[in-house]
């Protein structure tokens, strides 16, 4: 994707792609086995400006448009879809902290995020509430100059690796819905926090688990925005992250396509490369077209965001079509490799598992379709409980 990019963005893209090819891609499967993010590699990414490029210059970011952040995430995800969570979460959480956090709080954390010294996860989902994001049970009780947090967050990416979490908790009375939700930046080494890790099908380098809060005391200055304003923050943030996730998935599918095109030109059958058979190449050609279309949708959504234009429906389309299309394309690439593709020695099976998880996280296809219908036809189209409570 080069059309419409500035010279600076093209240079940034070239740097990101080269780093991903040389430093990130070779360790993709090893990081899966280790089940951890390579923090030294993350710091290298930070030194190149690949983390939080859209964050304010005063805090160490580049102050670049959302499109530039998308370029970094796409490049990194081509080498390792899991490592791309790092810049994605940096942009999502960093924007929340920069816009809604106290200046001292932002000045303390955002430089660490941008440099790759700190990983920050987002803690919204709870055991009894996934898509119904306004029905939170984790409580934050005001106690003088502090809030005391009690409860559990579940299905949190990087739960056991993050240095801090943007946590959404109920500060209003039971039944207050979205209006009773507040956000906090919580250091993960605070007394009273424990974590677990789930046994997942994929994304082992990132990991997913629960975070338990047992009388965790947080200063009031760690609250993000006004009390009760947390739900609006997360909804706006998801419009951003959903477009970035679409690019994350497109990049993983493109990596499998690139490898498969090379394979079909080398693999011989009946005395000639199998690339001569339309039954082999046509599915790959279809994959190229579908991924190109979703990629353009994602960048279109980011441009709308940069222009301050509405983009909620477009973001939902990215989140629905990106993972689904990528799963289909990677699956076809795996099949094209025959039994080689079925081997754990090739990366297609890992990409397939990693992308499948993104068909769930940040909103399922069904929720995304509800959002699109609601944006296009209004409240008469469908009653989406999460938005009704906002």
Image (tube, rainbow, N blue to C red):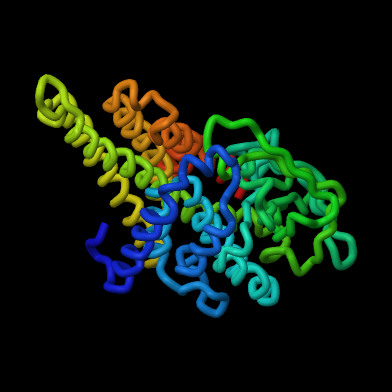
Residue found 57% across the figure and 63% down from its top: 116
Total number of numbered discs in the rendering: 0
Name the quadrant containing residue 276. Answer: top left
Residue found 77% across the figure and 53% down from its top: 171
- The front one of 25 and 125 is 25
- The front one of 322 and 281 is 281
Query: Where does residue 347 sit, x and y in percent of width and height?
Result: 40, 36
* Quadrant housing the N terminus: bottom left
Residue 308 visible in the shown view: no
Asked whether, in this view, residue 303 is left or right of residue 170, the answer is: left
Query: Where does residue 297 sit, x and y in percent of width and height?
Result: 31, 50
Name the quadrant containing residue 17. Answer: bottom left
Q: Is residue 344 above or below residue 44?
A: above
Query: Where does residue 126 sit, x and y in percent of width and height?
Result: 69, 39
Q: Residue furthest right?
A: 144
Q: Residue furthest bottom?
A: 58
Q: Is residue 382 above or below residue 142?
A: above
Residue 349 visible in the shown view: yes
Asked whether, in this view, residue 371 is left or right of residue 154, the answer is: left
Residue found 61% across the figure and 64% down from its top: 117
Residue found 58% across the figure and 54% down from its top: 234
Query: Where does residue 262 sit, x and y in percent of width and height?
Result: 22, 39
- The front one of 291 and 170 is 291
């Amino acid at each position: 994707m080069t059309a419409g990019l500035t010279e600076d963005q093209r240079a940034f893209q070239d740097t990101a792609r080269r780093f991903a090819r040389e430093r990130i891609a070779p360790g993709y499967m090893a990081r899966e086995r280790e089940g951890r993010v390579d923090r030294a590699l993350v710091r290298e990414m930070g030194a190149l400006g690949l983390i939080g490029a859209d964050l304010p210059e005063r805090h160490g970011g580049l102050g670049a448009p959302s499109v530039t952040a998308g370029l970094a995430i796409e490049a990194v995800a081509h080498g390792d879809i899991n490592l791309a969570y790092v810049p994605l979460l940096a942009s999502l959480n960093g924007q929340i902290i920069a816009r809604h956090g106290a200046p001292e709080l932002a000045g303390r954390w955002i430089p660490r995020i941008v440099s790759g010294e700190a990983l920050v996860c987002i803690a919204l989902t709870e055991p009894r509430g996934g898509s119904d994001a306004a029905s939170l049970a984790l409580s934050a009780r005001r106690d003088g100059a502090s809030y005391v947090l009690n409860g559990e967050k579940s299905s949190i990416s990087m739960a056991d690796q993050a240095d801090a979490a943007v946590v959404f908790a109920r500060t209003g009375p039971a039944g207050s819905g979205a209006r009773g939700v507040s956000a906090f930046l919580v250091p993960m080494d605070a007394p009273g926090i424990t974590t677990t890790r789930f046994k997942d099908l994929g994304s082992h380098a990132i990991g997913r688990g629960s975070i338990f809060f047992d009388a965790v005391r947080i200063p009031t200055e760690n609250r993000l925005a006004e009390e009760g304003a947390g739900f609006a923050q997360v909804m706006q943030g998801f419009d951003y992250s959903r477009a970035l996730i679409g690019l994350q998935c497109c990049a993983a599918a493109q990596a499998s396509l690139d490898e498969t095109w090379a394979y079909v030109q080398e693999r011989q059958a009946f005395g000639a490369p199998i690339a001569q058979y339309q039954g082999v190449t046509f599915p790959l050609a279809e994959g190229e077209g579908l991924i190109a279309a979703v990629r353009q949708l994602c960048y279109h959504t980011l441009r709308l965001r940069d222009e301050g234009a509405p983009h909620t429906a477009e973001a939902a389309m990215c989140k629905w079509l990106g993972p689904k299309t990528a799963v289909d394309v990677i699956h076809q690439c795996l099949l094209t490799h025959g039994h080689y593709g079925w081997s754990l020695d090739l990366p297609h099976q890992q990409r397939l598992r990693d992308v499948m998880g993104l068909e769930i996280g940040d909103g399922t296809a069904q929720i995304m379709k509800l959002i699109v219908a609601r944006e296009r036809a209004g409240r008469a189209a469908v009653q989406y409980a999460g938005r009704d409570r906002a």
